[in-house]
Image (cartoon, rainbow, N blue to C red):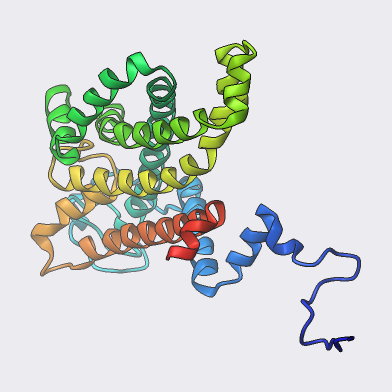
Amino acid sequence: MTIPLSSETLPVSAPGQPVAEHYSTLPGQLRAALGSIPVLIAFVMFVLIIFVAVCAPLLGTIDPVAINPAERLAKVSSAHWLGTDAFGRDTYSRALYGARVSLIVGIGATVMSLIAGLFIGVIAGYFKFADGIIMRVMDGIMAIPGILLAIALVSLTGGSLATVLVAITIPEIPRVVRLVRGVILSVRAEPYVEAAVSLGTRVRTILWRHMIPNTVAPLIVQGTYIFAAAILTEATLSFLGAGLPPEIPSWGNMMSEGRMYFRLLPGLILYPGILLALTLLCVNILGDVLRDVLDPRMAKKS
């Protein structure tokens, strides 16, 4: 029996292109995900934030740390597009440079935590004698609230960009270690890994060829969440006065200094707050997309 086919029963594809090619490869899945309007808007906005951070010296109208007491708490004008703060510093320029600080903190904390967590997690997952010791240390670090640990480290060593990066990175390392360890333990039980071990393959070769590549996709997804958490933690520390020095233009510092003048000039808090919220929203949306693309099982559950 011949079943008649119509154009409605066949998937649409370009001439000479395999059916469902767009959904069988990672680039195709990413293009399909960007077809969603919210995801596309988040991607464009995040690219715009990166552009603003990179080109802050060109887009800024005034030196962000220049103090001008004669124009303190000035309202929006042609000279100061978003007004000035209590020290007469241009709010617009400080907001632009605040994007640069946030991205530096986010990228730095993400890279450092992923590298350290990958190294420690591989050791804990592959070498059984080190597993118990390493994981108990990681459990001890996770038992301390991350924000309190960061405040303690910054208070002991002083506020600087390097100190804030270390203070934000340390609480994130145990989460990466647990993730990598789980992946290594599951891959270690696979037949092809057991065959490589029985053949006397060197440990370094087994790790680099068979185990570490399996951690790439989970680490990419985890990195997006660490990136967003690092930006939020830096803003929280700066708002509490335990982060970057006050003269450094960051969104947390701007909100901390502007809270006393909120009734007079709400923009001192609203402008950096909106930028911070938009950045976190974009990163979280893109992180969810990467999670669904790299792990289709999570897409089915959500």
x, y percentage for residue 215?
51, 36
Task: Please give the name of the residue rendered at 62% of the width and 20% of the height, measured from the top-left corner.
Answer: 196
Q: Is residue 177 left or right of residue 58?
A: left
In the image, is residue 55 above or below residue 278? Answer: above
Residue 202 picture location, percent across and down = 60, 11
Find residue 24 and report its image quarter: bottom right
Q: Where is residue 64 in the image (x, y as percent from the top left)?
A: 33, 46
Work out whether residue 93 or residue 22 is closer to the camera in this orientation and state it.
22
Residue at x 74%, y 66% (from the top left corner) = 20
Residue 288 or residue 7, whichever sits in front: 7
- Quarter of the image that includes the N terminus: bottom right
In this picture, residue 129 sits left or right of residue 207: left
Instruction: Give how far across and how far down residue 267 sits, in percent.
Output: 23, 66
Image quadrant in which the C terminus is located: bottom left
Foreground: 279 or 198? 198
How many numbered marks are there?
0
Q: From this viewpoint, is residue 159 visible?
A: no
Residue lying at 38% horizontally and 50% vertically, measured from the top left: 99
* Residue toward you, 94 or 298: 298
Q: Is residue 206 visible?
A: yes
Which residue is found at the position 38% from the left and 57% from the top? 279
Q: In this view, does 300 lie above or below 102?
A: below
Q: Name above or below for residue 295 compared with residue 137.
A: below
Give the quadrant of residue 195. top right
